[in-house]
Image (cartoon, rainbow, N blue to C red):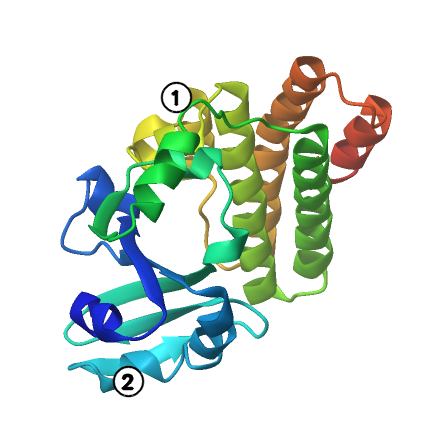
Amino acid sequence: MVGWFKREPGTLGIFLGGSIAAETADAYSDIDLRIIVEPEQHSHFVEKRREIPTQWPGFLFNEWLPGTQHCVSHFQPFGKIDIFYYDAAKLAPSPWYRLPIKILHDPDRMVADLVKRSEELTFAVTEDDVDFSISKGLAAAHETYRRAKRGELFYAQTLLDELRHHMMQADDWLHDRTPETTVIAKFGKRASGTVSIDLTMSYCACEGEAILAALRSLVRAYRNQVLALHEKFQLSRPLKNDMAALDIVA
């Protein structure tokens, strides 16, 4: 793949991110490949992002979203590669470039310079980030209750997972874990003890009462997290509304 991109006109840089660059990969890790391309060629690469991987041995299928500049491709026997295409003219320093990176092709030292200019930048959690997550967490709790009561049990189970996701996010924020932490340790290893236990104990049978019991258990734990998030980030959203929203389904 690297050889193909190096030969392709318009390629300016290639680097790896993720667990392979961090040297924490295992047999099931995916490959996070980043391609920097000339501005004039960027739209071409993005338009062809679903076709490019099909020519490589072992291709199985793609997954993608309309309007994005990346494609995730799956290969035999169990390979997965995420390829992002970056417009060289839009590259800017970012704390994301402080995460482990392995440079594979950088003839003009564009990637190396970007990494260097990003060294002093840090990740910051904004009030909007926390506000968004709490709103989605509350909505997931309410929708789980609604769907369980209506007998839509499969959907209710997926919504429980959404609530768990926001609890995991809250735990990271409350313990000042950044993406630098998360790329090294998966949540099962970095989670605080009580949250790990609460999440583990919440998995249940696909039955209405069991789902509602799991929801009540998660909401009790999430209530403490939301209180702590309000205190830590001095949120402007009304605390009493968040508590009332949780109490409805508790």
Q: Secondary structure at mark 2?
A: helix
Q: Position of residue 187 (x, y in %)?
A: 37, 35
Horizontal arrangement in the rendering, residue 238 relative to residue 164 (left or right): right
Tag of residue 11: none
Determine whether 242 is above or below 21 in the image.
above
Q: Residue at position x 64%, y 67% from top?
A: 152
Whether residue 43 is visible to the viewer of this picture, yes or no, is: yes
Horizontal side of 243 relative to 207 (left or right) equals: right
- Which image quadrant: the N terminus? bottom left
46 vs 240, nearest the viewer: 46
Q: Pick whichever of labels 1 and 2 is earlier in the sequence.
A: 2
Residue corresponding to mark 2:
54
Q: Quadrant of residue 239?
A: top right
Can you give x and y, in whole percent of width and height, for residue 238 in the image? 85, 25
For the residue pair 184 and 222, the one nearer the viewer reads as 184
- Crowding at dot 1, Cα within 10 Å, few <14 / some 14-19 / many 20+, comes out as few
Judge by depth and name the residue closer to the eye, 146 or 82.
82
Mark number for residue 193?
A: 1
Left of 173 or right of it: where is 227?
Answer: right
> The C terminus appears in which quarter of the rendering?
top right
Q: Quadrant of residue 105?
A: bottom left
Looking at the image, how many numbered discs can be counted on the residues?
2
Q: Identity of the amino acid at label 1? A: Gly
Give, as a three-letter code, the residue at label 2: Thr
Residue located at (17% from left, 81% from top): 58
State the separation of the CA atoms marked 1 and 2: 44 Å
